[in-house]
Image (tube, helix red, strand yellow):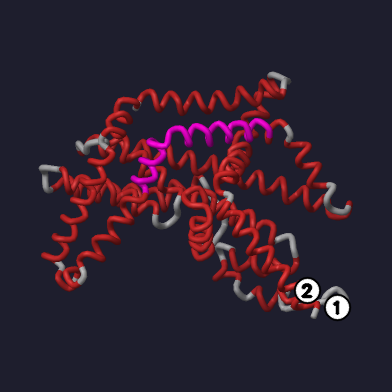
Amino acid sequence: MQWFRNLAYVLFVIMATGYLLLSGQSILFPIFFGMFFSFMLMPLEGWIFRHIPNKFVSIVSSILLVLGVFSGLAFLFGNQLISIVSDMSSIQDQLKVGVQTLLSYCDKHMPFMNLHSDPESVNNMMNKIIQAPIEFVGSGITNIGLFLFNSFLTLIYIIFILMYKEALRDFLMIQFSKDKREELGIILEESVRMIQRYLVGMLTVVIILATMNCVGLLLLGVKYAIFWGILAACLVIIPYIGVTIGGTLPFLYSLATSDNSWQPWAVLGMYVVINQFEGNFITPKIVGSSVRINPFFALLGIVVMGELMGIGGIVLAIPTMAIVKLLAQQIDVLKPLALLMDKDLLKKRNQFFGKFDRENFRISSLLNEESDKR
């Protein structure tokens, strides 16, 4: 009977967590992003605090420095941003034309794909895939009031998290017995360092890719080159599919609008070269091993977080999965799960029987009332 009671408790916690994430998006978004961005700002805030020993001044200064950089970039590309806002519906229509052109080309030159058997379904699927990022950008621009409100809340949370980070840490520490606090401190410090490495690394990758994309598209004469280049670079935060979508959008736009038959294929070739360089050199060198999650769990996290929290969940999926893995590494019953999530799973799969074939490592021990006695 105790086994069923424990199982019901675990299932209730999982369902309640999912419900809270699903129904509380508007509340949780600013909190989660504030937490992650505050982690990223901690080194800069700490450096300023060493020179100006005033907590509030160091926090506000670090935020203003970062906002100043992004505001400067927005000012530099303001004219193109205004043009994009006014032409957003036109861009979406031209992308649809690009899809139709591509499908017609494939149907003519690759009849074995049999796209003409159900052209409406294929067309609808392609439109949904390519328009999702555009619709997200468009909604963010048009719903400027909601965007500003969430941004303001995020800034407030960043300030308070940085201001009270020691108190928040102490609050978590006293929730555990004294013999567990050292281990908890290690987990918290490693989580913060890991998130910092990942976020700073990904930001660096996005900046490098945006520069390369924009320069390449400008040289090829693509309209709205800055917009397409930055959008494709930002989509790299979505593993595996973001890069593909980021290259497909300017290719389809060029296919629909270009007078030169070579330009769309030059755009596609440019993205293939840049993305190969990014995947094999830039990201491994900069982001490195800060997040060692295998592709299966990375994709699983993206799908689940995306379903629960939308685009924000997709952005936070990878660092969240990395934190889950880090926590699992510290709990006996979850250590096999941490191994299952590891990037080097194929090399370490023998460890399941070699290290974890004991009762205290089995998930069933959480539900078994006799597990403590064993």
Question: Looking at the magenta stretch, what is its main secondary structure?
Answer: helix
In the rendered view, tell whether residue 64 sits above or below residue 298: above
User: Residue 171 versus residue 194: which sits nearer the camera?
Assistant: 171
Does label 2 or label 1 sit earlier along the sequence? 2
Residue 354: quadrant of the picture = bottom right
Q: State how far apart marks 2 and 1 are (Cα).
A: 8 Å
Count every numbered label the image shows and give the total. 2
Residue range corresponding to the magenta coloring? 133-160
Which numbered marker is on residue 374?
1
Question: Which residue is farthest top?
Answer: 52
Q: Which residue is mark 2?
A: 360
In the rendered view, tell whether residue 211 sits above or below residue 67: below
156 within the magenta span: yes
Residue at the spot 68% in from the left edge and 66% down from the top edge: 12
> What amino acid type should be assigned to the residue bearing mark 2?
Asn
> What amino acid type should be assigned to the residue bearing mark 1?
Arg
Report if the CB atoms under discs 2 and 1 are less than 8 Å apart. Answer: yes
In the rendered view, tell whether residue 304 sits above or below residue 173: below
Disc 1 on helix, strand or loop?
loop
Residue 60 x/y as whole percent: 62, 24
Residue at the spot 11% in from the left edge and 48% down from the top edge: 261
Residue 371 x/y as whole percent: 82, 76
